[in-house]
Image (cartoon, rainbow, N blue to C red):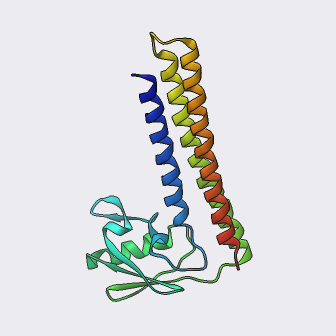
């Protein structure tokens, strides 16, 4: 594998880690109802755990209410259970084929808990970025027929990409913390 290909692969891995962190943070509840809030919920359906969006339609008809409409009516109770156990502090109620998920006001304590969750998600993103860097550095050292100076330049390039990706995750975290703590 060539040095530019290693750098490209490392950048791709880091970009995926940043995007995954962005998606995970978008699922953290704030004062407004968004369908993305339930993206992290997984439902036990048909003998396996699947994302909620694959078994139901999620919408936000009101600022403080989500509605979930299962594609298969037999999954209603499983979807309710998954939302309740999803760690988001939500209490869904079923009305026939429609599940209503009211969003309660966030207490100060709950806001602090959500900030901690955001921090953990951001740290997972940083770990994935550092793993991509570590893999790239290991591959750079194994490349033969290239001068040590060229390897060192490539390592610096990978480190620069790592620093940029970590900075992006930190910016995402700051923005989400401000959003969660906003009253």
Which residue is rendered at x = 55% and y = 41% of the image?
A: 129
Where is residue 149 shown, x and y percent of the image?
58, 15
As drawn, 172 above or below 123:
below
- Name the residue at 52% across, 23% down: 138
Query: Is the residue 4 above or below the residue 33 in the image?
Result: above
Give the quadrant of residue 60.
bottom left
In this view of the protein, which residue sits in the foreground, 132 or 39? Answer: 132
Where is 169 relative to 109, above or below?
Answer: above
Total number of numbered labels? 0
Q: Quadrant of the N terminus?
A: top left
- Quadrant holding the C terminus: bottom right
Q: Please give the name of the residue rendered at 49% of the width and 71% of the height, measured from the top-left corner.
A: 37
Q: Along the line of sight, which residue is nearer the eye, 82 or 63?
A: 63
Q: Which residue shows up at 60% across the image and 83% down it?
A: 104
In the rendered image, the vertical position of residue 88 relative to residue 48, given as above or below: below
Q: Which residue lies most toward the right here? A: 108
Towards the viewer: 31 or 42:
31
Residue 38 horizontal side relative to residue 77, left or right = right
Q: Where is residue 17 drawn, in percent x and y?
A: 50, 47
């Amino acid at each position: 594998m060539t040095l530019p290909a290693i750098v490209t692969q490392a950048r791709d891995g880091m970009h995926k880690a940043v995007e995954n962190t962005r998606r995970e943070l978008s699922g953290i509840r704030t004062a407004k109802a968004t369908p993305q809030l339930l993206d992290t919920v997984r439902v036990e359906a048909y003998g396996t755990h699947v994302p909620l969006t694959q078994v139901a339609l999620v919408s936000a008809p009101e600022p403080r209410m989500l509605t979930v409409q299962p594609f298969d009516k037999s999954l209603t109770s499983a979807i309710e259970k998954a939302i309740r156990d999803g760690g988001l502090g939500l209490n869904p109620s079923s009305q026939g084929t429609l599940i209503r998920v009211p969003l309660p006001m966030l207490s100060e304590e709950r806001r602090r808990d959500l900030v901690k969750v955001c921090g953990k998600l951001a740290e997972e993103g940083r770990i994935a970025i550092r793993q991509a860097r570590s893999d790239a550095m290991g591959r750079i050292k194994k490349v033969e027929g290239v001068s040590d100076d060229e390897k060192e330049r490539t390592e610096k390039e990978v480190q620069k990409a790592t620093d940029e990706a970590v900075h992006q995750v930190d910016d995402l975290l700051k923005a989400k913390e401000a959003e969660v703590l906003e009253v």
